[in-house]
Amino acid sequence: MTHGAAMISEQHLALLICPSCGASGITLGGRRDPALECGACGVGYPIVSGIADLTPRPSGKPVRHYRTEALYDVIARWYDVAAPLMSLFIWGCPPLRYIDWSHRAVGRAMGGRLLVHPVGTGLLLKHVYSIHTQYPIVATDYSWRMLRQAQIRFEKAGMDNVVLVRSEPEHLPFAPDSFRAVMSMNGLNGFYDRAKAMAEMSRVLEPKGTVVGATLCRGLERTADLFLERYERWGIYPILRSRSYLVKELQEAFEGSRVRYETHGAVVFFLVDRSLPPVERPPS
Ligand SMILES: C[S@@+](CC[C@H](N)C(=O)[O-])C[C@H]1O[C@@H](n2cnc3c(N)ncnc32)[C@H](O)[C@@H]1O
Ligand SMILES: [Zn+2]
């Protein structure tokens, strides 16, 4: 298991739960090829070129969802060029905003562990990482190709404290309270079951932790809406309807936590802060 940006250590093993049955007690299996094993249900999870594939067996994803995976596998090689251009000209959001908000996420992880979910090609993480070299980071994605690009990038940059894991947002393979902060840039708009994915983020976050993220939203930019409508028709993104709906969903998933947000073009940046007292809800 020495080919990754970082190896899975005993400490990481303690963080893991089985995405298929939810039990803790994941160990390094005794098979010839490197693999993790669940002591409770016996399912094995391969480690491919240093990246542990901790997606549930069988996958919880509906077949339709493989279109999103295929899309990212196909564009992985061009993502670093395409993403900033799309952000600027289609989503109407200056790419530097992502850097600002990613810094917030990394800053909030201070003294704890950061989950980067999804990591994509690691483009943002590398840019914000250089001044925060001491953080233990776990980074996930579903697309193998995106993960491989991230791995290559982190290896070249000598970032040996980032552990890459393939996971499904609806079944995160981590124990409760594992992370002080979660950074989730442009992930929510692609997650199939958003409510479940948010509930999973809430479960793995420390009680006073923070989620910092960004997502595409409908109804904010005309050009963006044309694209988002097509994506939805092709079954690629289960799109968020509106900004107020997003805030409501986040508040529900994070039990009334305060949600701060800022909008740039069709992108809504948000920060869910569990260190502050929850917002009082009007009686329903
Ligand atoms: C727009 S990229 C953002 C990557 C990174 N956060 C960034 O800002 O550069 C979206 C990422 O989410 C992943 N993704 C999209 N839909 C997903 C899903 N339903 N399950 C898991 N990952 C998904 C893709 O593989 C892709 O790497
Ligand atoms: Zn299991």
Image: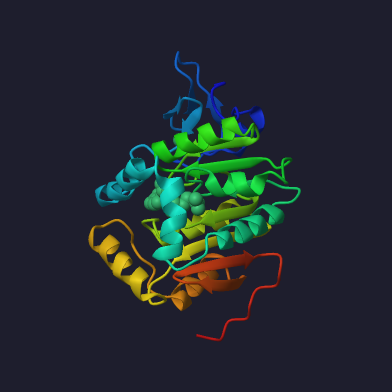
Looking at the image, residue 218 sits to the left or right of residue 231; the answer is right
For this orientation, the residue located farthest to the top is 32
The percent coordinates of residue 261 (x first, y second) are 57, 72
Q: Residue 243: x, y in percent?
A: 46, 75
Which residue occupies the foreground of this view, 100 or 20? 100
In this picture, is 44 found above or below 70?
Answer: above
Of all residues, the one furthest to the left in this rendering is 233
Residue 202: image quadrant is bottom right
What residue sits 51% from the left and 46% below the top? 119
Q: Position of residue 147 (x, y in %)?
A: 46, 38
Can residue 169 be seen here? The reply is no
Q: What sort of colour scheme is used for the picture? A: rainbow
* Residue 199 appears in the picture as rendered: yes
Horizontal side, residue 66 vs residue 281: left or right: left
For image coordinates 70% across by 56% down, the residue present is 108
Nearer-the-camera pick, 202 or 69: 69
Residue depicted at x 40% and y 40%: 77
Q: Quadrant of the N terminus?
A: top right
| Number of numbered discs visible in the structure rendering | 0
Q: For the view shown, which residue lies furthest in the bottom direction?
A: 283
Image coordinates for residue 248, horizontal then vertical, percent = 49, 74
Where on the image, by quarter, is ligand 2? top left
Camera-nearest residue between 150 and 191 = 150
